[in-house]
Amino acid sequence: MQFRDLKKQYEVLKLSIDAAIHDVIVNTSFISGPQVAELERQLAAYVGRKHCITCGNGTDALSMALMAWGIKEGDAVFVPDFTFFATGEVVSFEGATPIFVDVDEDTFNMDVEKLEEAIKVVLEEGKLVPKLVIPVDLFGLPADYEKIEAVAKKYDLKVLEDGAQGFGGSLNGKRSCAFGEISTTSFFPAKPLGCYGDGGAVFTDDDEISEYLKSIRVHGKGSHKYENIRIGWNSRLDTLQAAILLSKLKAFQDYELEKVNKVAENYETSFRELQHVMKTPAIPESFYSSWAQYTIQVKDREIRDRLQNFLKEREIPTMIYYPIPMHRQKAFEGNKLYQLCPVTDKLCETVLSLPIHPYMELEEQNYIIDSVKEFFG
């Protein structure tokens, strides 16, 4: 059994993916081939943005957004404490200070009340200038952007959506990567829409920001590649990856998103009788998840570790996203903690992610469900 079965996906999409790869090789357009521009067009249309700028990976996408806004030393950037390291890493890389904000225990996403508390503490201290909020669409569920954007507007902060795990999710019909002034996503293979290597994208409706991002992803180029008008870097999406993503994007829209939600619904229905011993993911009204992960919560770490070992013995793969809070990462040990994050501390001890993907057979799903039920007696 696979945690996210990319082999099965390839078997289903083999003819389309092989043809797409063959076309790139035959035409030798390995860098910035026509498939890249076509992918950007389709992604922008799907998300509902004016511009899509692809790049080398999701971390670069975040960094490019921070560069576009000139985020620098002395700036405060508010990020969730419970998420992957890159969201805070890019802030420090630009010389700014990540401010870790606790999350909501039900949705795993940034707690809006805690966000405002953190902003107030930073303002009262007066050492840093609050500039930006980076909510994360964790595990496929969009953050509560309506409330977050209201708080950001109140304190004159920009919002950068980190949709690395959220592509395909939505809030009130508005799709992930359409929130904030700029949004980003990742095409890491295990993401809801993944390629066969690294890849990422930035979305915006701002023409000037779009042109800036297109420049810095290719060494700060101007009107042609040998005119360099600013210092940039090399972060282009390979044509091969774009071709693969075009094939996968069609399947994602046609049926994958619907199928992975059916798997999640089966989990939810089947686990209702275990609500006294484990907690299933909450999807609030008007929200729709793309289910990058299906993450349950149990009472404590001892139970979590025993359950993980129990499932491993039955050849059911599981993952812990995430075992260490951002504020406890060694790389951030010199950073001041502006608020305690008890929910994040608890989640890191009690979460466990079960296999989920669009190609899970019902027999596999029921084997996982029965095994979890057996563990709890």
Image (cartoon, rainbow, N blue to C red):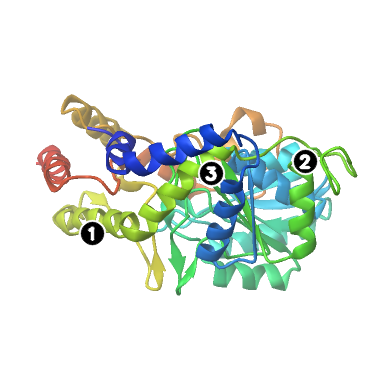
Q: Mark 1 highlights which residue?
A: 265
> Label 3, label 2: how many angstroms apart (C-alpha)?
28 Å
Is residue 198 at least partly visible in the picture? no
Identify the residue shown where x is 57% and y is 65%: 178
| The N terminus sits in image quarter | top left
Q: Is residue 322 left or right of residue 305?
A: right
User: At 17% across and 52% down in the image, what residue appears?
Assistant: 274
Helix, strand or loop under label 2? loop
List the single residue furthest toward the front.
26
Mark in the foreground, 3 or 1: 3
Q: Where is residue 193 in the image (x, y as percent from the top left)?
A: 44, 48
The 10 Å Cα crowd at callout 2, few under 14, some 14 to 19, many 20 or more, is: some
Q: Mark 2 points at which residue?
A: 94
Please give the residue where the numbered disc 3 appears in the rendered image.
Answer: 242
Q: Which of marks 3 and 1 is nearer the N terminus?
A: 3
Label located before the other in sequence (3 or 2): 2
Q: Residue 225 carries which label?
A: none
Which image quarter holds the C terminus? top left
